[in-house]
């Protein structure tokens, strides 16, 4: 198939692009490189099946070739990025999603929206299942990202119901692995880069807040499976193994052999206290389960980070 991947030069997008090329598909990456990196695709540059288009998808785009699938991953995704680029974040969730749904309608293509666990906000139920409507502050520091994704989901459903566009929605929980930007502010690259530099690890609050970390190869495998199944309702993708941030920091120190200590600071506004996906739907619909353990995934990520720190 010929497949479009928006945000294909980003962390997750580049891994997805690589997997699709390995399956023999032709991939058109659309990226404006405001947070993605050409370096993430360098090892794929010689593939005759890869075509890279530098373009801001908040502006209309026309592709003459027949497209069968669209994976929409384009968006700033880390707090540092979307708080620095709030208007761009909102525009890519709204205008960008609108443009791609128009492309899907015109091409009779299937489109998958990469949404996020952030649509659940600071959740009041645990673990988070797809039927939960969330606890989001629309005017807080995370509102530009949370609401851009919530609007994008609503727009996808509107095109599905009104225009009969063939849509899929996934909600991605914390994902990590090689090619994460080590300065993007998210907890995995932040802890790893601090530990490798011998700096103390910055823990916000008392470290009792939890996250659930999914290795990128597991996520990509789930994304492709969701795209090729028939259910059009949101599906959580993430690893349900929950861990406190304090315990996670201590594990990073052990794995790196660092002498770093934990350095505690104030908890950011609206930071989720607990985050754990209920993946019952993914298990039932696509028989998907994360396979890479946290220790195995962190070792692979550390090998990559040591070369790039």
Image (cartoon, rainbow, N blue to C red):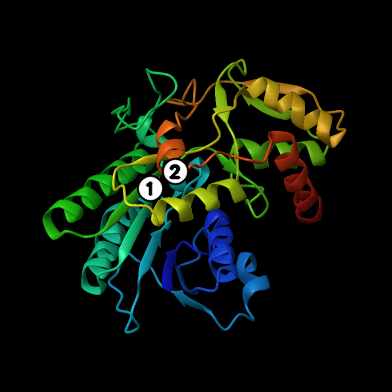
In the rendered view, tell whether residue 215 sits above or below residue 239.
below
Residue 125: % across, % down = 38, 18
Task: Let me know if residue 142 appears in the view.
Answer: no
Q: Residue at x 28, y 28 (%)?
A: 133
62 displayed left or right of 216: left
Q: Residues within 10 Å of mark 2 (few under 14, many from 20)?
A: some
In the image as oriented, which residue stretches furthest toward the left? 162
In the rendered view, tell whether residue 152 sits above or below residue 137.
below
The answer to whether the residue labelled 2 contacts the one labelled 1, judged by CB atoms less than 8 Å apart, is: yes
Q: Quadrant of the N terminus?
A: bottom left
Q: Which residue is mark 1?
A: 86
Decide which of 78, 117 is in the foreground and name it.
Answer: 117
Residue 297: % across, % down = 70, 42
In the rendered view, tell whether residue 201 sits above or below residue 238.
above
Residue 296: % across, % down = 74, 40
Disc 1 secondary structure class: helix
């Amino acid at each position: 198939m010929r497949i479009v991947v928006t945000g294909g030069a980003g962390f997750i997008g580049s891994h997805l692009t690589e997997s699709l090329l390995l399956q023999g598909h032709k991939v058109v990456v659309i990226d404006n490189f405001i947070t993605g990196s050409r370096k993430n695709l360098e090892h794929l540059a010689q593939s005759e099946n890869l075509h890279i288009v530098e373009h801001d998808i908040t502006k209309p785009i026309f592709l003459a070739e027949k497209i069968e699938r669209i994976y929409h991953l384009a968006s700033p995704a880390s707090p540092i990025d979307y708080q620095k680029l709030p208007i761009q974040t909102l525009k890519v969730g709204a205008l960008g999603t609108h443009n791609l749904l128009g492309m899907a309608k015109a091409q009779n293509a299937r489109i998958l929206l990469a949404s996020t666990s952030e649509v659940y906000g600071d959740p009041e139920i645990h673990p988070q299942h797809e039927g939960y409507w969330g606890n989001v502050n629309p005017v807080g520091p995370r509102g530009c990202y949370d609401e851009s994704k919530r609007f994008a989901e609503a727009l996808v459903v509107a095109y599905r119901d009104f225009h009969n566009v063939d849509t899929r929605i996934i909600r991605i929980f914390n994902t990590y692995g090689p090619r994460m930007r080590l300065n993007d502010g998210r907890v995995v690259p932040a802890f790893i880069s601090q530990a490798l530099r011998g700096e103390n690890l910055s823990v916000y609050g008392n470290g009792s807040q939890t996250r659930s970390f999914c290795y990128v190869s597991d996520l990509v495998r789930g994304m492709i499976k969701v795209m090729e199944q028939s259910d059009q309702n949101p599906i959580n993708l993430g690893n349900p193994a929950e861990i406190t941030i304090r315990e996670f920091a201590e594990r990073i120190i052990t794995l790196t052999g660092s002498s770093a200590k934990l350095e505690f600071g104030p908890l950011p506004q609206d930071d989720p206290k607990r985050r754990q996906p209920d993946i019952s739907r993914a298990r039932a619909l696509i028989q998907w389960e994360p396979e890479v353990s946290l220790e195995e995934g962190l070792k692979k990520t550390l090998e990559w980070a040591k070369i790039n720190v």
